[in-house]
Structures are given as structure tokens and as C-alpha cells.
Amino acid sequence: MDLQQAKILLEKIASLQKSIALNKGPMAAIERDLMLSYIRQLYEVYMDSDEPTLSAKTGGNNEEVKVAPKPIEVEQPRTTYTPPKIEIPEPPKYTAPPKQETPPPPPPVPKVEEIKREMPPPAPPIQRSSSNSQQNFAALFDFRQAKELSEKLGERTITDLTKAFSINDRLLYINELFGRDNNAFNDSLLLMNKFENMEDAKSLLINLAEQNNWTDEEKLEIAQSFIKTVRRRYV
């Protein structure tokens, strides 16, 4: 038996026990394992002795003292740490936004040359048979200059004759000036929209006046109102 090694182990055990005693808290796992290691080494030192029995004198008789066999070390089962299972939720499925319908392209704008080809030539001046007829046609285009603010506001420029009339005015002009022919009224407005000045429109208006008797007393004032609105297209 190595007594020197046993002495060293005993000193280590005492020193470790003193350190554990000074630490008032619970014993750390590393301190416990170290203490068990020292004790196990000390046990092995005594077990490794070459003399299996010891002789001791007791009352003059030699008695054999049997050394206990080395205990079998039973390895304690190790506990395996199993981390808790964390379920990760599936991300929401991507839903594509609904496709936006592409609006149809606007109709092509006719070229100036095409508009000019569609425009009929100005109507030739009409030969009037009497001075009364000439005076009546002249009265259709006789307008005094606006002086009041309300009158000036009523002479603002119109860009589209087809949108210049209210429903009541359209019904009045169709019934009284165009023989209740809605198509004739609309076609006349579309044609006058293409004219560049009032002189071109005047020839068409005179033809319409002759065909529908705008110079009659009951239609004259209504025809003047209609022509006054058409005149704002070329201001």
C-alpha cells in the first residue's frame, strides 16, 4: 500500500471538505464529483495492498483480519436530456391578387385629312325670290352684342354641339325646327361640329331654315335661339 499517496488523498479530501463547508450554499455538482473521485482513489489505494490479511495481536493470540473484497461499482444510469418539441406554424399560403382587366384601347382619333374628306362642300347660296324672304333669313342671324354679365356668360364657347343642349331644348328644337326627326337634328349637330367657322355653318342653317320654314312667325324666335347656341361653337 502506498501510504504517501493515501496521505495526499486524505489532505485533498480534507481541503475540499473545508472549502465546501465555507460555501454556505448547496454543494455544486463538480464539488460532489471531485469528492467522490478522491474517495474512490483512496479506496483503491487501500485495496491495492499486497497483504490480503492483516495480523493483529489481541491477548497474545494472533488473529487474522480479513480484508473486505472490493465492491463492485455500479454505474448509475445517465439521464438523457430531451429538448421540448417546438411546433413551428406553417406560413400562410400566398394568394395571388385578382388580375385586373385591361381597359380596351380608346378608338383611334381620325386624322384631319379624313375629317376634311368626310365634310361635305358648303351648300351653295340659295336664290331668294323676294326681299321679304331675304329679310326673314337675315333676322335669323341678327344678334345684338351682349352687354350684361349674364348675357356674356351665356355666350361662352361651346366645344361640342351634341352636348350643348338640355333635354327640354332638344325636344323643343326637334319638334319645332326639324320636323320631329331626331336623326336629322343629331346629324346636323355632328356636321356643324366639323366646320371651322360660322360662315360654313350658315349655309347649312339656311338650307335647314328653308326646308323646315324657320322664318314662320311661330318658329322664328325658336330658330334664333337655336342658331345663337350654334354660333357659340365658333366664338
Image: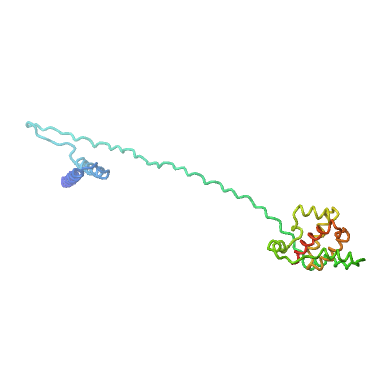
- Locate the C terminus by quadrant: bottom right
Q: In the drawing, does residue 192 fall left or right of residue 73?
A: right
Above or below residue 183? Residue 232 is below
Location of residue 58 (image quadrant): top left
Location of residue 195 (image quadrant): bottom right
- Locate the N terminus by quadrant: top left
Above or below residue 57? Residue 123 is below
Instruction: Report x, y in % for residue 154.
Output: 71, 61
Location of residue 14 (image quadrant): top left
Q: Residue at image x 51%, y 45%?
A: 90
Nearer-the-camera pick, 35 or 187: 187
Q: Residue at image x 60%, y 50%?
A: 97
Q: In the drawing, does residue 223 fall left or right of residue 102?
A: right
Instruction: Report x, y in % for residue 220.
Output: 83, 59
Nearer-the-camera pick, 122 or 45: 122
Instruction: Report x, y in % for residue 131.
Output: 90, 67
